[in-house]
Image: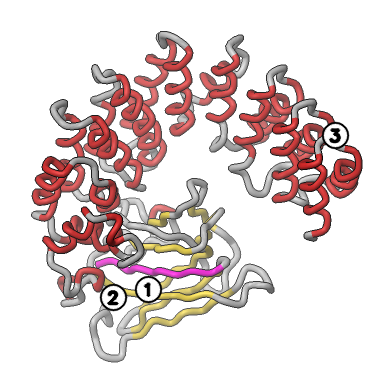
Amino acid sequence: MSLRSRFSSAGFAHLLKVAGPGILACAFIGSAAAQIPLPPLPPNAINPVMGFETVEGWIVKSSFPSTRVSSTTTRTQGSFALALVNPASGTTMTSLRVPSTASALGGVGETGAIFEVDLMPPAPHVTGGSLKLSVSSPSRGLKNELLEGHATEPLLAAALDSAKNKGADRLLPDRLAALFRQRPEATTAAISLLRKNGPTKRVTDALGSAGSPAAVDALGSIARDRTLPRPLRIDALTAFILAQHPSVVAMRTPAALLDDDDVSIASAARIVSGALARAGRATHPAEADRIDAALVARYRKAQGIEEAQGLLAALGNSLGPSVTPVIENALHDPRVPVRAAAARALRLAVGPEVDRLLSAIITDDRDPGVRAAAIFAVSFRHPISPALGEALVHAASVDPVKYVRRGAVTLLRQNPNASPRIPETLAWIAEHDSQPGVRRLAQETLTSK
């Protein structure tokens, strides 16, 4: 059984209950749009019903790569809550699979069972939004509404015609993911369709979102087949990134192609493997460590700047304990593109030491491209630390390169509380910067408050 919540707004929190003979509850904050895989609930989850006390109990996907789930003490009632960090404009959250025989789910499917929703806007200005809740429990006769009235063949046919169907069925990606989760035999038809028609990202992405064993096997068979077009194989590899709780098999599939004869396939496999190491580390730490070791070994033997850049990007996707020191060391590489790649690779790293490193790059690196790469990495943080705020104030004020100053001003605009010196800095820039575009951006920031 799984519970699904689709909602959209500027972001909100709600407490959810299913009432019958027992109660299940959860709380979360945010917004995004997604296709959701449904792996089993982790065995170490605290709550045997929905596991909402742990961030591993729910899956959320967003159009923002930095959207993530964290625990929070902000709640309307109860003892546990989850928060969506850096949400987009709409979200679909789905619980992991749980036994429908749990006593607290006794009311599911019965007349009179209800959803109780307690909404709490995160800020006074949030006045609009919508929420949709659904339960899928085949054993209780509750089928996924996404597939009601939709046969397999028409759904796959709709996926082929992206131009005709663009916007016609906004739930088509979700329907396809549900199709591959709940009708494993549909993956065979999907493989035939891809082999016949070539790259179709709607299909490969839906297979990745489904995350079922059959879907993983389907993507693997496509990625490994050297007779298929390169773009199709790359689509199959990148689809693995959509699995937020990848299985060991899913983690190993791209890793087997790290040294593929096709350089583009090998590059994609490395990028994806890094992402899977990060996504799978909590439940499969040994597998994540093996991926990290393989990527680090290849980085140390990299032939040329381009390969080193690609491997640093893969390491940045992982950020395992053995990986971060390698990235930090690359910040001192004499080659500018390698230093820039290392700075970008720290975008998901957290902690005072990482902030210190990025601050130093922003203020001291001799190459503007590297300084801009560090500012790009900082853009993934919200809020940003005081140390980074001061570095951005420095760059916005005195960096000799226009695009570096502009990038710094943009982040100051997005993080007005990062430093108490931001208002006076923006006022000075609006009056004295040598470039009209930078002056205008600073002025717009001041007047928009």
- What amino acid type is highlighted by mark number 2? Leu
- What amino acid type is highlighted by mark number 3? Ser
Q: Quadrant of the N terminus?
A: bottom left
Is 387 located above or below residue 168 in the figure? above
Say whether marks 2 and 1 touch (CB < 8 Å). yes
Q: Which residue is mark 3?
A: 434
Image-based side of 69 in relation to 235, left or right: right
Q: Secondary structure at mark 1?
A: strand
Is 378 located above or below residue 443 in the figure? above
Image-based side of 91 in relation to 435, left or right: left
Specify the label residue 222 is tagged with.
none
Magenta range: 1-9
Q: Which residue is mark 1?
A: 24
Say whether marks 1 and 3 touch (CB < 8 Å). no
Q: Which residue is mark 2?
A: 105
Q: How far from the left and from the top, in percent, is residue 399? A: 79, 28
Between disc 1 and disc 3, whose residue precedes? 1
* Cα distance between the residues tagged 3 and 2: 65 Å
